[in-house]
Image (spheres, grey):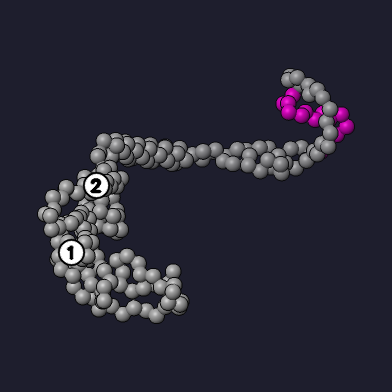
Amino acid sequence: IYERVIDPPDTNLTPGSNLWLGQRNRKHGFFKGVLQDVKVIFMPNGYITQCPNLNRTCPTCSDFLSLVQGIMDLQELLAKMTAKLNYAEMRLTQLENCHCEKTCQVNGVIYRDKDTWVEDDYCRNCTCKGGVVECRRMACPPLNCSPDGLPVHVPGQCCKVCKSKCIYGGKVLAEGQRIFTKNCRECRNGILVKVTETCPPLNCSEKDYILPENRCCQVCK
């Protein structure tokens, strides 16, 4: 083990003594310039006062071995990280080339790409295309009703269906349509059927009573 050895300075300064700043002897160039706030310390190893990190021993063989081992560990770690990075780049390339199916979600129901369904509330045919829902109004086939029938809307169905019509006083009534004679009647399967309906009280005078079309109860104007 090697250690820096510095002889203690001679603190016995006699008249005529010289102080060399940053120089070893008179063979080197003289210091030129102006000094300000100079502090000269006369003591063994006085340089340690301002430069404490200089008092260190020289590196040993074991220190070099530790340094070499540390470098080898870093090289091994770098090789592992490089391998992981290459694997990650390969996975990303595979994902970029992968076709990920996009689904559609409607009212909590998930549909796969190109799935079709019918929206009963709006009578539309819908299709999932690339994660986007496309809907079109349902196309109904033409109806060729008999002379005794009429095309009418039926609750729960999107397209009209043929239903038998009723005729009263020369007026044609469709399925479900009502008319008020002496009592309330409704057209059902081509027959006027009596309907029992309780009418609510009205808050107006009788002269303001009116009977809306297809209703059996009068209302106020």
Specify whether 72 is left or right of 11: left
Q: Residue at x 75, y 19 (%)?
A: 29
Sort mark 1 into few (<14), some (14-19) or many (20+) by Cα contacts within 10 Å: many
Q: Is residue 10 visible?
A: yes
**Outermost residue toward the front in this view:** 169
Specify whether 180 is left or right of 81: left
Q: Give the mark nearer the N terminus: 2 vs 1.
A: 2
Q: Is residue 83 visible?
A: no
Task: Report the front residue among 123 and 173.
Answer: 173
The chief SS type of the magenta part is loop
Question: Which amino acid lies under the numbered mark 1 shown in the image of this protein?
Answer: Cys
What residue is shown with label 1? 166
x%, y% of residue 203?
Answer: 45, 78
Find numbered disc 1 in the image and state the secondary structure of the residue it sits on. Answer: strand
Q: In the displayed structure, would residue 65 be above or below residue 152? A: above
- Total count of labels: 2
x%, y% of residue 117?
Answer: 21, 52
Specify whether 77 is left or right of 173: right
x%, y% of residue 140?
Answer: 19, 49
Find numbered disc 2 in the image and state the secondary structure of the residue it sits on. Answer: strand
What residue is shown with label 2? 127
Task: Report the front residue among 11 and 58.
Answer: 58
Task: Report the front residue among 1 and 178.
Answer: 178
Q: Which residues are magenta?
A: 12-25
